């Protein structure tokens, strides 16, 4: 059924379809009976999939990566679709329009997307207020959805002052999110990836840890890295994460490379710059997850992202050492049943191979 709907939706601009679809789902979920039906159709309630990480309890290990619900507008709807956690953002201190449209492109032959969104968001104060209302809504007091806050810097903020932007976002969102992800790996903000160098990272992360340690309740801090890092850069990230006792890494963001695509060169070239996500990222992402887990001796928890379309893809990431997985492009191509299908396949694998979510080694 979804394949037919997808074929129609893919006739329209990708970014317009994104908001159209989510707004339709919002209208649907505003009706209590329809929300219950949506949860029954797409939700999952398998207690054996509960995952414990960084003092948080995730009802299942399948989350939605940052960039889908940038402004925390669709949490109720995404919870109804069964996600164990949703990462909002990337959020910046000041609102940003992002890059010029069109800036989101489909590559159906490759099950991929290219985006150059540019951290478009409503700004941290607006997003924080939206999250405050979500948390205070009495109808949601029983919600077990884990919310992550993905934070970044404004486009016009020079890199030497980037730490201030991360501080602002961290302080504003701290009361309302369950964990943080520091995004220094998007290819769509000029110069941002330069912050992945070891000393730049140290300054940002240790400053956030200092603020975090002064809070009554500290929140886990993860770092999101690019798939385009070389081995030395990955080793630097691992060394730093171990040194400062970072809570974990998210591997990986989108790639700037276009190797091995089925889509014609002229079409890809006409799209231009941006981060490639989806199936072409699958093997590189899995390799990095496995490398981090082996190199650190399993001491660094990893959230795996990149090329996850089904349960087999998710299990591959979990077996590589990941603690949780995130979908994004797979959600676009596979539709609203993706979480339920992945969880079902993980459950089947657990039964057949007798491993558990919290003990996969």
Image (cartoon, rainbow, N blue to C red):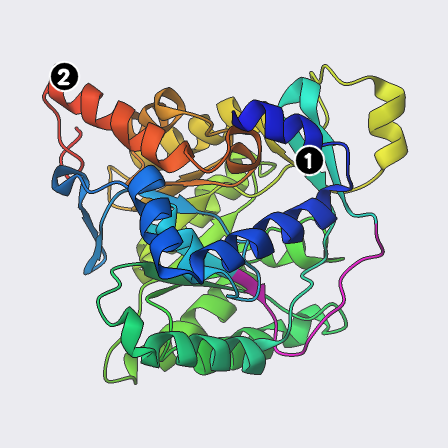
Judge whether 54 appears above or below 314 on screen.
Answer: below
Label 2: element kind: helix
Q: For the residues carrying marks 1 and 2, which lies nearer the camera in this image?
A: 1
Is residue 297 visible from the viewing direction of this image?
yes
Classify mark 1: residues with Cα within 10 Å, few (<14), some (14-19) or many (20+).
some
In the depicted view, which residue is nearer to us: 257 or 357? Answer: 357
Residue 61 appears at what percent x and percent y?
29, 42
* Apparent side of residue 11 relative to residue 247 in the rendered image (left or right): right
Picture quadrant of residue 70: bottom right
Residue 178 appears at what percent x and percent y?
32, 66
Residue at 51% x, 29% y is: 334
- State how far apart marks 1 and 2 are (Cα): 39 Å
87 in the magenta segment: no
Residue 188 circle label? none
Residue 353 circle label? 2
Magenta stretch, residue numbers: 89-101
Picture quadrant of residue 43: top left
User: Between disc 1 and disc 2, whose residue precedes?
Assistant: 1
Judge whether 23 appears above or below 331 on screen.
Answer: below
Residue 9 circle label? 1
Residue at 63% x, 69% y is: 153
**Marker count (numbered):** 2
In the depicted view, which residue is nearer to us: 279 or 255? Answer: 279
Residue 191 appears at what percent x and percent y?
73, 58
Residue at 72% x, 42% y is: 14
Residue 252 appears at what percent x and percent y?
50, 41
In the depicted view, which residue is nearer to us: 136 or 213? Answer: 136
Label 1: element kind: helix
In the depicted view, which residue is nearer to us: 60 or 340? Answer: 340
Would you say the residues marked 1 and 2 are in contact, meaning their CB atoms lie under 8 Å apart? Answer: no
Q: Residue furthest left?
A: 354
């Amino acid at each position: 059924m979804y394949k037919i709907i997808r074929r129609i939706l893919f006739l329209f601009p990708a970014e317009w379809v994104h908001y159209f679809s989510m707004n339709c789902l919002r209208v649907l979920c505003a009706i209590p009976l329809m929300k219950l039906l949506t949860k029954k159709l797409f939700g999952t309630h398998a207690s054996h999939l509960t995952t414990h990480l960084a003092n948080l309890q995730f009802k299942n290990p399948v989350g939605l990566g940052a960039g889908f619900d940038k402004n925390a507008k669709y949490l109720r709807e995404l919870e109804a679709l069964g996600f164990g956690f949703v990462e909002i953002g990337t959020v910046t201190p000041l609102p940003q329009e992002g890059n010029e449209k069109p800036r989101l492109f489909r590559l159906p032959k490759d099950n991929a997307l290219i985006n150059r969104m540019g951290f478009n968001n409503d700004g941290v104060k607006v997003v924080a207020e939206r999250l405050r209302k979500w948390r205070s809504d009495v109808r949601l007091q029983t919600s077990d959805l884990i919310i992550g806050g993905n934070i970044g810097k404004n486009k016009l903020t020079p890199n030497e002052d980037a730490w201030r932007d991360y501080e602002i976002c961290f302080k504003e969102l701290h009361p309302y999110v369950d964990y943080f992800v520091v995004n220094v790996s998007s290819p769509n903000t000029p110069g941002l990836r330069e912050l992945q160098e070891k000393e730049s990272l140290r300054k940002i992360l240790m400053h956030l840890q200092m603020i975090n340690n002064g809070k009554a309740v500290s929140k886990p801090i993860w770092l999101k890295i690019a798939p385009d890092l070389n081995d030395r850069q990955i080793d630097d990230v691992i060394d730093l994460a171990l040194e400062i006792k970072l809570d974990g890494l998210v591997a990986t963001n989108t790639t700037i490379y276009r190797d091995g695509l089925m889509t014609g060169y002229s079409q890809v070239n006409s799209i231009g710059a941006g981060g490639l996500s989806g199936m072409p990222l699958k093997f590189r992402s899995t390799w990095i997850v496995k490398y981090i887990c082996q190199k650190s001796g399993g001491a660094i928890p990893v959230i795996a992202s990149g090329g996850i379309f089904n349960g087999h893809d998710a299990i591959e990431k979990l077996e590589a050492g990941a603690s949780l997985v995130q979908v994004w492009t797979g959600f676009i191509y596979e539709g609203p049943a993706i979480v339920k299908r992945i969880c079902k396949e993980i459950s089947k694998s657990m039964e057949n191979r007798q491993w558990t979510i919290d003990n996969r080694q």
